[in-house]
Image (tube, rainbow, N blue to C red):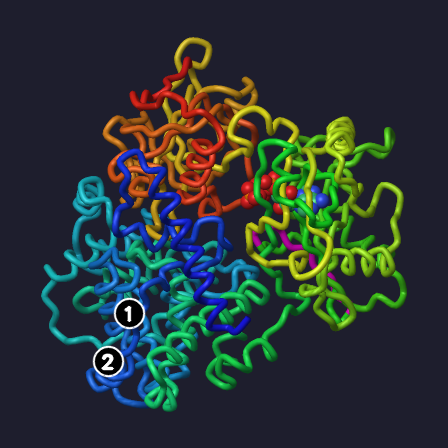
Amino acid sequence: MSKLKKNLRKRLNRRRRLLRLSRLQPNGKISQSRQGRLSGFSEPIFTYTSLLCFDRADMFSKSSAAIESASWKKGEPVPYAALCQTFEQIESTTKRLQILDYLVKFLISVIKLSPESLLTVIYLSINKLCPEYEGLELGIGESLLMKAIAESTGREMKKIKADYAEIGDLGIIAMSSRSNQPTMFKPKALTIPHVFKTLKDIASLSGNSSQKQKVDKIKLLLVSCRNKEAKYLMRSLEGKLRIGLAERTVVVALAQAIVLSRPDIKKMSKEKLQVELENAASVVKSVYSELPCYDLIVPALLKADIDGLKETCKLTPGIPLKPMLAHPTKALSDILDRFENIAFTCEYKYDGERAQIHKLEDESMRIYSRNSENMSAKYPDVMERLGKFAKPDTKSFVLDCEAVAWDREQKCILPFQVLSTRKRKDVKEEDIKVQVCIFAFDLLYLNGESLLREPLTKRREALVDHFNEVNGEFAFAKSMNSTQIEDIQTFLDQSVVDNCEGLMVKTLNGAEATYEPSKRSRNWLKVKKDYLSGVGDSIDLVVIGAYAGRGKRTGVYGGYLLACYDPDREEYQSICKIGTGFSEQDLEIHYKELKEHVIPEPKSYYALGEGNKPDVWFAPVRVWEIKCADLSVSPVYKAAVGIVDSTKGISLRFPRFVRVRDDKSPENATSSEQIAEMYNDQKLNTVKNDTSLGVDMDFDY
Ligand code: ATP
């Protein structure tokens, strides 16, 4: 099938899905601003969805105009003001295509006039300083930022605090504080390279006097800010831009800007240009999920264009790729429905922590988490033993595994709760009490070659051929091939007896069985042991508030307010209160830990219903795994508002706490799109519960 046809078919399928979903709306409507997002349902999680109705015919002339009207000249560093102006335009709209247009135009100017700044512009647009796995993060505490504003503007700290309590946005406060301040000399205008370098320096500072040094550096930036610059600078420092610019939009904009900067597009037909733009976006997204490193991708794009990108930027040991994820199922029969006439295999779903193990050509090894965090220091014992798992001819590799707590005496797997007691930092091998066994379920790279496009059967063969099982230390995931539902049920029961969470069911052969980085693929299904109850899968939510405990819970928090995350709007949306599933010990631990994160007011990026009034608010730091009976439309909560209903959100009924998810950052919590998808699936699969009352299920604490 030609590329054009494939693209058309893809778009048609998206439109069909959109229609199917629109039929499911209680009011039969989808809000305009959400349509682009909806069309991406069940697609790769790292996808951009609004290429429907795409028209860029006049883009070239617009881009020439953008360059002519750029506020700087060729070869000069990009002014920070130019980026802030683009942020302002983006913030002024919720239309995804409009946002994309603004960013594309700005990126074209950068590519044409100051290409050496493109990488830093991309980092500032996604509010990061380096690849995730390097772990350098912004996110300076509010009090430090308030201090910097006070000292640089001469305003009293108590006034700034009062403004913050009222406005809740340090960006706006910094901006208005600055404009009240008379200046004798006009300071030099800020440039992108200077701002980025200073932000990096600030994030790298540590040690005793680092707080003061940070404040000093922020002050120096603040006094040079003009117009809206202080607003976006503060928000960058806080760690949240809140302009509605999702990273996936930045990736698409980058791809499109590269294409539109080429001189040959002048002669291209509208149709050809459209295909080129869609192809570019899909190539850059796919390369990014395999090699999530703009430091490599951006220079390669500038040098080799889109066509050369796949050749130059490939899976590389030492750079963690975004892991493939699975779709939840509710019944074993879902498996047979999905995999009718397709060869599949069932594997134990181990209940531990995902571990991506890399061996580089230089013999060094690394272990990365599901979040691409370097966990090598958490597992010095595993690092020590890794060498003996690989056969002598296995020089470099990337393994996908689960690290599971292991009882050496009984020779059996221990529950996840045991693994979670293992220290995460400064682990000394001699102090380790919880032993782990590594269960390898995939091999993604071997001796200089990527295996991502090989089917699972081949990857498994290579895994078994190149590694040795070592008792209680390293094993291949237990698997079983059968299409008989009784066999699958028996294997599932056995997995539970063996302390696993259930099964992973995966396609074995052909193009449907390749490894799809970052995708929540339907080629991997997860079957959890308690899939028959509740919504089929647990949900990972962010703790944003708490209620004072009464009765037996006096002295600790009695219940909590939880939220899901909307990456497009960059906001946490309230979803339920929870007071069930906690042991007394859990309540003590959560209280001790979360009271350190109390904030005076809810963050401006918390989307809350009128009745969401906990006794204390928390900064978004903790993710909890939650189970519930079902989901219902609710006027009280804001989760997925605008997707299923234009004004009401979705709420969880009878939520109960399962465990803390240390391996997920708040932005990796279950997204509003996933919540909407679960709600719609529930409506498809079951007779709809009577949710018309939208009752907020209260709890007993
Ligand atoms: P999600 O983001 O899909 O909600 P999650 O991190 O919450 O993912 P689960 O829903 O429990 O995790 O399921 C996927 C996880 O199961 C994988 O990330 C991996 O850590 C774990 N796992 C255990 N055994 C296997 C296996 N045999 N194959 C693949 N993954 C496995």
Q: How would you rate the neighbour count of disc 2 (Cα within 10 Å): few for under 14, some for 14-19, many for 20 or more? A: some
The residue type indicated by label 2 comes to Lys
Q: Is residue 688 left or right of residue 372?
A: left
Is residue 366 within the magenta segment? yes
Q: Is residue 483 left or right of residue 694?
A: right
Residue 293 at what x, y percent from top left?
A: 53, 68
Residue closest to the eye, 228 or 642: 642
Q: How would you rate the neighbour count of disc 1 (Cα within 10 Å): few for under 14, some for 14-19, many for 20 or more? A: many
Q: Is residue 145 left or right of residue 531?
A: left
Q: Is residue 587 left or right of residue 256?
A: right
Q: Is residue 260 above or below residue 134?
A: below
* Residue on which disc 2 sits: 62
Q: Secondary structure at mark 1?
A: helix
Residue 51 at what x, y percent from top left?
A: 37, 64
Give the image quadrant in which the ligand numbered 1 is located. top right
Tell me where the magenta segment starts and ends, as one range: 363-371
Q: Is residue 268 above or below residue 601?
A: below
Q: Is residue 358 visible?
A: no
Q: Mark 2 and mark 1 in contact (Cβ < 8 Å)?
A: yes
The Cα–Cα distance between marks 1 and 2, rounded to whole angstroms, is 10 Å
Q: Which mark is residue 101?
A: 1
Q: Is residue 461 visible?
A: yes
The residue type indicated by label 1 comes to Asp
Q: Residue placed at 89% from the left, 43% from the top?
A: 471
User: Which quadrant: the N terminus?
Assistant: bottom right
Residue 335 at what x, y percent from top left?
A: 64, 39
Q: Residue placed at 61% from the left, 53% from the top?
A: 324
Q: Earlier in the sequence, mark 1 or mark 2?
A: 2
